[in-house]
């Protein structure tokens, strides 16, 4: 109004926006058309091009247009491109925010490592470390490979796996993971696998794969979009024809047609599922939950059964001495020394007795392990034995009354009883059991409170199964099962039409895990790629079962909300943009306002998905 060349300034700035800002829209549209596809980029390209080139025609050939048709829409085409780019920028920022955990993991990958070659130190690329190589790790350095400590002791920070910030003491023969930070001493680590196969790299790969996948509900939106775009193009043409042949001005017909193209841009529809999946996977990773396959999100809507394996899932998988009796307290170091160096849960339970480190390790000779029964050795010419009742019967060793009573009492409790023998006489008895995880009762109660049937499966005997199920309040349990028996049980439930979640060991329970609708592996996996579970709980926290189900269900609800609002927005927006209410109320959307409305829908979807980062999931 105040500057004679303002129209040409509009043309200049609009051209920069149209062809620089909108370059990606044109490029993607041409690529899609070559593949005989029509996508949202095509709608933006056609809509803004129509407004832009119509404005140029009016500006250059003004005399050829009636005075009431000499309208410029440079601001409309520029605003549409600006708001679509704004929506994409917000989507990108949201994706980056949702993948913060991924960035932290990537930052843990060490670039260099100190490799010991012929006794000399060599600085090499960390990724080049192979199984069997020995590396030196100084205090403050990242451990470059999964391996075992062969020299030195330290405290490490491996919070990326455990989720806990406390340092973990490590000594020779202890395992360490790549990405952990050596906080105190200097250690030498022997690689147990190639650096590229480390747990850290496997976690990163699984997260990337999961974020790129879509559940069926997401592919449905893609299919609808493929038909939706051509339909909108046809509707836009029909809107133009309708108003023009009804006698409305050309600029009115063009405005209505362009507004239909702009407001119908299915950006929100395209964002609805992927932006939600990114946030679900990112939030899960922060909680120590790896979603290997996001398709389980859709299956979580209605869960009928959650079936638990017992050992290592509901229980710690570590044996513990509940009670013991000794004829003489001085005998305890003898039996501890007999069990020392034996890698068996029962032996570890004996070794973990309080204050055993204060006992002097006695020299036990000729140790012999009798598989499934016990261990025998010689001390000062006398036979020393630790074994179960079966071994005592085979050796015709009799029990005195107090040991017989101890045996019957603890057997009825579902515990394993191991006897200590010196010479040919029973002088000690130990009652050993697996410890129930602290949060197992909470998880079982949470599931039952939501009407989900809880079942426990175990390979242990009836007494053990009965004890654990009674403590946890599980009514249905099955015992003496093989992995195939567990598989058949899951299969029978599915054949009846139930949706089944199986929670257990992702390797040993692989058949049941694969057969279930949702498999949750509750363990710190040494080889995540071989896990059968579709969800992996990295820190073995049983509460992760609750978090996984809760996050999946809330994520699915968010996807449905996003799709609903995206569909409703287009269903209501297209008629308004096409001028449906103009004859009655004089309401007509300018393409610029249609672009704003379209961007608002995308922003709404993004913000709705973003809430998954902050909601409570336990």
Image: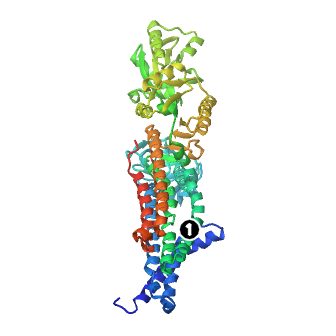
Q: Answer yes or no: is residue 293 visible.
A: no
Is residue 114 shown above or below 9?
Answer: above
Q: Nearer the viewer, residue 320 or 504?
A: 504
Q: Residue at x 51, y 57 (%)?
A: 274
Q: Nearer the viewer, residue 391 or 36?
A: 36
The C terminus is located in which quarter? top left
Q: Residue at x 49, y 80 (%)?
A: 249
Is residue 551 shown above or below 511?
Answer: below
- Left/right of residue 379 with respect to residue 130 in the rendered view: left
The N terminus is located in which quarter? bottom left
Residue 468 x/y as whole percent: 47, 24
Residue 327 x/y as whole percent: 42, 13
Q: Quadrant of residue 71?
A: bottom left
Mark 1, Cα crowd under 10 Å, few <14 / some 14-19 / many 20+, is: some
Residue 349 x/y as whole percent: 46, 27
Q: Answer yes or no: is residue 542 visible.
A: yes
Q: Which residue is most to the top? A: 401
Q: Residue at x 49, y 21 (%)?
A: 466
Q: Nearer the viewer, residue 16 or 14?
A: 14
Q: Secondary structure at mark 1?
A: helix
Q: Which residue is most to the left? A: 2
Q: Nearer the viewer, residue 126 or 511?
A: 511
């Amino acid at each position: 109004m105040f500057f004679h060349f303002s129209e040409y300034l509009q043309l200049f700035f609009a051209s920069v926006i149209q062809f620089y800002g909108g370059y990606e829209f044109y490029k993607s549209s041409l690529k899609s058309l070559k593949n005989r596809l029509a996508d949202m980029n095509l709608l933006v390209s056609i809509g803004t091009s129509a407004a832009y080139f119509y404005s140029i025609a009016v500006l250059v050939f003004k005399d050829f247009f009636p005075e009431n048709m000499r309208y410029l829409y440079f601001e409309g085409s520029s605003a549409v491109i600006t708001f679509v780019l704004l929506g994409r920028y917000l989507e990108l920022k949201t994706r980056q925010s949702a993948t913060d955990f991924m960035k932290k993991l990537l930052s843990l990958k060490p670039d260099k490592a100190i490799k010991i070659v012929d006794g000399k130190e060599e600085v090499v690329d960390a990724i080049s470390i192979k199984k069997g190589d020995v590396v030196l790790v100084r205090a403050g350095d990242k451990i470059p490979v999964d391996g075992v400590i062969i020299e030195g002791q330290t405290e490490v920070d491996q919070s990326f796996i455990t989720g806990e910030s406390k340092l973990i003491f490590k000594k020779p023969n202890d395992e360490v993971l790549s990405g952990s930070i050596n906080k105190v001493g200097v250690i030498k680590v022997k690689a147990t696998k190639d650096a590229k196969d480390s747990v850290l790299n496997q976690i990163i790969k699984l997260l990337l794969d999961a974020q790129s996948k879509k559940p069926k509900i997401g592919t449905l939106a893609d299919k609808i979009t493929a038909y939706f775009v051509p339909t909108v193009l046809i509707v836009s043409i029909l809107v133009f024809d309708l108003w023009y042949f009804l006698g409305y001005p050309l600029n009115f017909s063009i405005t209505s047609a362009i507004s239909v193209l702009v407001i119908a841009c299915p950006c929100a529809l395209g964002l609805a599922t992927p932006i939600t999946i990114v946030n679900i996977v990112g939030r899960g990773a922060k909680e120590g939950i790896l979603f290997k396959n996001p398709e389980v999100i859709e299956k979580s809507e209605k869960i009928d059964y959650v079936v638990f394996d017992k050992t290592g899932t509901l229980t710690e998988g570590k044996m513990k001495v509940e009670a013991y009796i000794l004829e003489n307290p001085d005998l305890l170091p003898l039996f501890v020394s007999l069990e020392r160096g034996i890698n068996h849960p029962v032996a570890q339970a004996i070794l973990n007795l309080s204050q055993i480190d204060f006992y002097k390790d006695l020299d036990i000779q000729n140790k012999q392990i009798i598989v499934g029964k016990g261990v025998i050795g010689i001390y000062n010419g006398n036979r020393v034995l630790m074994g179960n009742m079966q071994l005592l019967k085979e050796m015709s060793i009799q029990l005195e009354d107090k040991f017989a009573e101890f045996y019957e009492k603890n057997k009825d409790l579902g515990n394993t009883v191991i006897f200590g023998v010196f010479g040919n006489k029973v002088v000690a008895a130990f009652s050993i059991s697996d410890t129930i995880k602290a949060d197992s009762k909470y998880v079982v109660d949470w599931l039952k409170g939501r009407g989900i049937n809880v079942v426990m499966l175990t390979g242990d005997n009836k007494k053990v199964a009965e004890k654990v199920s009674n403590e946890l309040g599980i009514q249905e349990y099955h015992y003496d099962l093989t992995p195939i028996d567990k598989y058949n049980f899951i299969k029978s439930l599915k054949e009846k039409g139930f949706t089944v979640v199986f929670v257990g060991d992702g390797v040993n329970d692989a058949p049941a895990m694969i057969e279930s609708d949702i498999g949750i592996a509750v363990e710190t996996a040494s080889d995540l790629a071989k896990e059968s579970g579709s969800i992996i709980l990295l820190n073995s926290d049983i509460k992760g079962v609750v978090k996984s189900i809760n996050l999946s269900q809330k994520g699915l609800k968010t996807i449905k909300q996003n799709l609903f609002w995206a569909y409703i927005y287009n269903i209501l927006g297209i008629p308004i943009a096409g001028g449906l209410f103009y004859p009655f109320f004089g309401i007509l959307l300018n393409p610029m306002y249609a672009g704003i409305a379209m961007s608002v829908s995308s922003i709404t979807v993004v913000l709705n998905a973003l809430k998954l980062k902050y909601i409570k999931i336990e």
